[in-house]
């Protein structure tokens, strides 16, 4: 790889990304930029090119924290810098690897030397190196949440803290924060998205001429990096000079009352949580004015600031796509474009308006329409799942002989159609509204990535025991260390109040928290699910479990089975948004190859176990337990289930059988899997709580009667 960076001005297109990066270069107080886009769109190339445009900085010689000679950090761990020599160097670009540890980010303290020798030995981390430069986080959505929290806290406060067993170090950490992510690989939580100042969505151009120019320039750069960079050297110098000029103009820019009112009105109109959006929009609008060479913020600055700062703050749940209604934005800006009217004038104008007849507008307190609510039926707007009897079968165990299933659509259902393979299928139905589900977890203690589902040994959580350090001592168990050293003090010649500690005395904490798991859904999409109008409720249940997996930081995968085969509809991923989209478009129809679905799930888990041996799986089978395609279909599915039991895979069976007469095949399958079996009604967290309350009340009544 060449040491010559690809020129920033040589990148084709990407106007919003270019502007977002430049605004942060002008005013790092904007809060950084998150770049969202598909793979292969030059996200990393543009970020790395930006570092070459930043002005060089003056730093104190020998200071590991790049202190500014004009205003050195009084808390710098390298001590006071009065009269120290200085030197100039380019602003650094520090890249954060995906698997980075907390100690590598904030720095590490040598606790053994601190306790045994009284020496505060501190090794700076990446935050110290990024001070006054650029911190670039590629695939930020793949980092652990606590690591992202730590980075964003440092970016917001401009200071990094290291606390270990009473030993404390702090230093300045002000940097331009840039994160990139591919949404297909998983989303950031809305709370973390909000901490990024700006967000830019990018996608590769579909214009052939523009794509050809991108390829042409890349090939020219690969053939002669220095020569290619030389062609754009003048443009690079001009752009760097414009950044410097905008930085110098920034303190002179005036944010007028009209512009500020437009900013706050826009944030209120879009119902953005908190006030961070208002502050970021104000800073962005000021930076836009400085970038344009003006000393006053205009409406066009406010509009562009809203387009960059608000879309990612509009998400209310993980299935919402970031976005902004441009028409609503224009209306709000127009309504608040003039000077604010005095309260008395506004009151007089309001009083002069002709009152409307009572009852015409529900907001006036008049009578309202008593028609049906928007949900159109039950209290939760969902469909009725019961009432249907199971379809007849040719065998007492519920299996059926090979051949088409005699199931006709009920009134109001979509008419079955034929897919390319000849399997009858119905058009996809919408999912029911998601709800909070009960918690399913993997028993035992794992060692997977931090999450919120199953017990595991993690970096966080509560301390459960002590052990000898495995590598560098990071989490000292003080009492265990003292107990290990105490019996040896006389033999070691202790002659003062200080303990004599040896390396073998140190003990580290073992903490138990929660891990994330791989939740693999195996969903029955056969004709039996569609014929009883259950798919809306089933999809709502799976969507609810997807929401739960998102909140617990799990990876998810989805297998569907229908017709004659099973399909891996969603390979294991961290993106529940993709899972929700695949679920929404899932058609139904055909036979029920349950065994094929289970065998495909077994193969997927085998491959994932090799890729990530520490991530424990949770299998969720969504079925009524019926199996068709051959006379021994049910027996084959039960034999396939025993493969998971032999490997100790934690499983849940979501029993979708409905109607007054039930065969109980799903619960038989659950017994073969060693799984928990729950119905759609039992899946709801509030339903479980109600069952517990009823059970307690029944026991209390029985106790009183016995007394």
Image: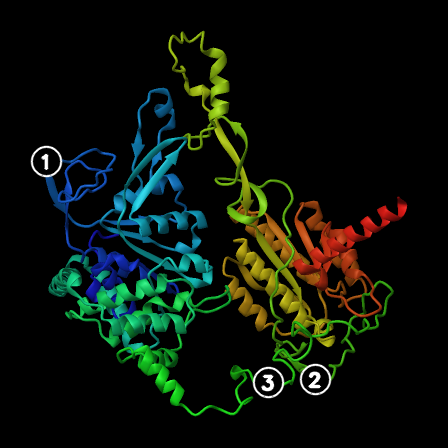
- Disc 2 on helix, strand or loop? loop
Q: Position of residue 362 (x, y in %)?
A: 54, 84
- Taking the image as shown, residue 164 lies to the left or right of residue 631, namely left
- Near mark 1 (Cα within 10 A), the count class, few <14, some 14-19 or many ≥20, is few
Query: Considering only order in the chain, which callout, 1 or 3, is on the residue closer to the N terminus?
Result: 1
Closer to the camera, 251 or 196?
251
Query: Residue drawn 57% across and 50% down?
Result: 517
From the image, tell me which residue sits under label 1: 83
Query: Considering only order in the chain, which callout, 2 or 3, is on the residue closer to the N terminus?
Result: 3
Q: Position of residue 467 (x, y in %)?
A: 51, 27
Residue 547, picture quadrant: bottom right
On-image quarter of the C terminus: top right
Marks 2 and 3: in contact by CB < 8 Å? no
From the image, tell me which residue sits under label 2: 412
Pick out the residue farthest to the right.
706
**Mark 3 or 2: the one toward you:** 3
Q: Position of residue 186 (x, y in %)?
A: 47, 59
**Mark 1 or 2: the one toward you:** 1
Q: Which mark is residue 368?
A: 3
**Is the residue 129 above or below the residue 366 in the image?**
above
**Is the residue 44 above or below the residue 302 in the image?**
above
Gap in Å between the C-alphas at discs 3 and 2? 31 Å
Gap in Å between the C-alphas at discs 1 and 2? 84 Å
Residue 514, picture quadrant: top right
Query: Considering only order in the chain, which callout, 2 or 1, is on the residue closer to the N terminus?
Result: 1
- Taking the image as shown, residue 550 lies to the left or right of residue 5, namely right
**Is the residue 501 above or below the residue 16 in the image?**
above
């Amino acid at each position: 790889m060449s040491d010559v960076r690809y020129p920033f001005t040589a990148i084709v297109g990407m106007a919003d990304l270019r502007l977002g990066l430049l605004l942060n270069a002008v005013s790092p107080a904007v809060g950084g930029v998150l770049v969202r886009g598909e793979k292969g769109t030059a996200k990393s190339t543009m970020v790395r090119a930006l570092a070459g445009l930043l002005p060089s900085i003056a730093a104190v010689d020998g200071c590991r924290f790049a202190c500014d000679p004009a205003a050195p950090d009084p808390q710098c761990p390298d001590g006071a810098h009065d009269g120290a020599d200085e030197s100039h160097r380019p602003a650094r670009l520090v890249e954060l690897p995906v698997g980075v540890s907390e100690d590598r980010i904030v720095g590490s303290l040598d606790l053994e030397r601190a306790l045994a020798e009284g020496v505060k030995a501190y090794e700076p981390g990446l935050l110290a190196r990024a001070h006054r430069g650029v911190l670039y986080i590629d695939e930020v959505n793949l980092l652990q949440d606590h690591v992202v929290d730590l980075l964003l806290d440092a970016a917001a406060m401009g200071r990094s803290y290291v606390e270990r067993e009473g030993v404390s170090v702090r230093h300045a950490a002000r940097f331009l924060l840039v994160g990139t992510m591919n949404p297909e690989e998983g989303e950031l939580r809305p709370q973390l998205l909000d901490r990024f100042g700006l967000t830019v969505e990018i996608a590769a151009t579909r214009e052939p001429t523009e794509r050809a120019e991108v390829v042409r320039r890349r090939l020219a750069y690969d053939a002669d990096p220095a020569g290619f960079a030389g062609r754009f050297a003048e443009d690079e110098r001009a752009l760097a000079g414009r950044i410097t000029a905008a930085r110098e103009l920034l303190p002179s820019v005036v944010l007028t009352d009209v512009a500020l009112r437009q900013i706050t009105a826009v944030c209120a109109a879009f119902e953005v949580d908190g006030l961070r959006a208002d502050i970021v929009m104000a800073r962005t609008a000021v930076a836009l004015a400085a970038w344009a060479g003006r000393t006053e913020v205009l409406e066009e600055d406010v509009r562009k600031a809203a387009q960059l700062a608000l879309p990612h703050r509009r998400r209310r749940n993980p299935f919402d796509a970031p976005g902004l209604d441009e028409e609503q934005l224009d209306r709000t800006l127009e309504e608040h474009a003039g000077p604010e009217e005095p309260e008395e004038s506004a009151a007089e104008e309001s009083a002069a308006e002709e009152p409307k007849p009572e009852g015409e507008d529900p907001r006036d307190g008049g009578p309202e329409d008593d028609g049906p609510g928007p949900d159109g039926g039950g209290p939760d707007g969902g469909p009725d799942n019961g009432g249907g009897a199971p379809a007849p079968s040719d065998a007492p165990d519920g299996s059926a002989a090979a051949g088409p299933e005699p199931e006709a659509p009920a009134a109001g259902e979509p008419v079955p159609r034929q897919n390319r393979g000849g399997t009858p299928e119905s058009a996809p139905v919408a999912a029911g509204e998601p709800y909070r589900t009960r918690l399913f977890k993997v028993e035992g203690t794992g060692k997977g990535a931090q999450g919120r589902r199953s017990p595991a040994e993690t970096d966080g959580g509560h301390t459960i025991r002590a052990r000898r350090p495995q590598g560098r001592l990071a989490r000292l168990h003080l009492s265990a260390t003292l107990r290990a050293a105490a019996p040896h003090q006389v033999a070691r010649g202790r002659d003062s109040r200080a303990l004599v500690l040896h390396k073998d005395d140190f003990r580290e904490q073992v903490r138990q928290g929660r891990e994330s798991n791989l939740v693999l859904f195996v969903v029955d999409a056969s004709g039996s699910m569609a014929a009883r109008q259950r798919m809306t409720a089933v999809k709502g249940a799976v969507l609810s479990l997807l929401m739960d997996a998102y909140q617990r930081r799990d990876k998810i995968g989805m297998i569907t089975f229908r017709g004659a085969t099973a399909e891996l509809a969603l390979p294991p991923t961290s993106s529940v948004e993709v899972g929700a989209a695949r679920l929404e478009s899932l058609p139904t129809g055909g036979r029920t190859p349950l065994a094929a679905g289970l065998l495909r799930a077994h193969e997927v888990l085998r491959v994932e176990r090799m890729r990530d041996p520490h991530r424990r799986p949770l299998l969720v089978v969504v079925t009524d337990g019926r199996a068709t395609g051959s006379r021994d279909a049910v027996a084959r599915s039960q034999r396939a289930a025993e493969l998971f039991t032999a490997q100790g895979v934690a499983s849940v069976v979501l029993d979708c059988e409905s109607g007054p007469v039930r065969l109980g095949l799903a619960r038989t399958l659950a017994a073969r899997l060693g799984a928990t079996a729950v119905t759609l009604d039992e899946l709801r967290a509030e339903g479980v709580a109600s069952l517990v309350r009823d059970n307690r009340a029944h026991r209390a009544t029985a106790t009183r009667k016995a007394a």
